[in-house]
Amino acid sequence: MTHMAPTPSRSVASDQGRELVAHWFVALVMNGMFGGVAVGILIGEVRTEPALEWLLLGIAALGPLLLVHAVVATVRWLRFRGVVLELDPVPGSLGGEVGGRILLPLRRLRAEQCSVSLSCIRVREGSDSTFESTVWSVERRPWLAYGRGGMEVAFAFAPPADLPPSSADGSVTWVVRLVADVPGIDLDLTFPVEVAETPEPLHSSVDLLPASEPTSWGGRDARLGPGIRVDRTGGALVFRYGVRRSLSMGIALGVFGALCLGSGTFIFRTTFRGGYGLFELVFSGMGLLFLLVFGLVGLALSLIALNLIFTTRRIEVTARGFAVRWRFLLLTSGKEISIDEVDRIAARVMGQSGQGARASVRYEIKAHLKTGGSVILGDGIRGPAHLDRIIRLIEAETGTRVEVEHRPPLHAGIPQT
């Protein structure tokens, strides 16, 4: 969803109302477009190719799910519609701090139940669509205190000075997102905030939030995200990347790949004429072209989905280097590399699902070798907080810096320059 750049203001309302309208609009349009067609197919009033009927029924099945999401969004809006963010300082300052306080109508809330994130989002307008990409994001546990009328959530971050400020045309926006597991409907609020280049860095009265994870291994549960675990075995720090880390993305790509293959096959079947006249050859050629394009795209997506779902990794990290093992179904392979062979270690974005502050960004970490080539040290890492914890553990074990664009500050009170 596109956020227009807000005007500098201490009190900032959430985007709940706009998101609620979007939920209901999509749900009603989907059910209106495909619901009637699905009913017609089920009662026999609408007849077409069996493959197309199944495709339409599958799309129509998403309609009730969208209605459920709209109802949940409505209940959340009714419960938290009066919640505002008190920004401190005003505006947020690049090279300084972005902070604030949010008073929630809750009697009890623990820090481990919630997280607050700050994201810089770039919005690109296409000919018929809008795409939002996350430029930078950081996530932490907030400070909590009992306030008048509920629980007060306080936070402060130190965004790097070289990030783009909020733009008047909405092409660059900054968003604060607060997520909490609470009884009933979970809390999930986003607040568009103004972040600017100020003549002097502005600072918040709220203390900067601490780093998300210490620089030493803290036990079996290091909160590295779904499907990713860390343990110490035989003097080595061992990361295990299981199937859960990329399962949802793999399934989504697999379904989309199957739809592409089915669509290409259906178009080819409906346009193929089987004759040798000009008319038949033109329509048959168009159908064959669609089959090749959709088929190749569907096949590529299906192969990527299989790789995401069935590939697991085991990475042993020591001060001397890395021992990498990966498995795909019954196939296994491995490689050992020493620190002296490594030119640099870098993390990068490998994919994004969703848009804006609610986007789920996945990262991978690679060791680039001096002789050329690279070795994957981790993939399917969800979100900047999990990436930050894994990077800190690797750096502490190897003594080697991991490169990542716009790295959050290592120490809470010392903004990174």
Image (tube, rainbow, N blue to C red):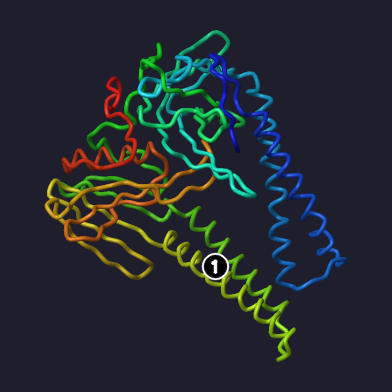
User: Dot 1 surroundings within 10 Å: few (below 14), some, or many (20 or more)?
Assistant: many
Q: Is residue 236 left or right of residue 7?
A: left
Residue hosting label 1: 298
- The image quadrant that residue 76 belongs to is top right
Query: Which residue is located at x 66 percent, y 36 percent?
Result: 72
Locate residue 100, reporting x and y percent.
Answer: 47, 17
- Asked if 251 appears above or below 161 in the picture, the reply is below
Name the residue rendered at 68%, 73% in the picture: 266
Q: Is residue 19 above or below residue 36?
A: above
Residue 68: % across, % down: 69, 42
The secondary structure type at the circle numbered 1 is helix
Q: Quadrant of residue 208?
A: top left
The residue under the point 53% across, 38% down is: 356
Residue positioned most to the top = 148
Tag 1: amino acid: Gly
Residue 190 in the image: state x and y as whole percent.
55, 29
Q: Residue at x 31, y 32 (%)?
A: 213
- In this rendering, is residue 34 above or below 151? below
Q: Quadrant of residue 150?
A: top right
The quadrant of the image that shows the N terminus is top right
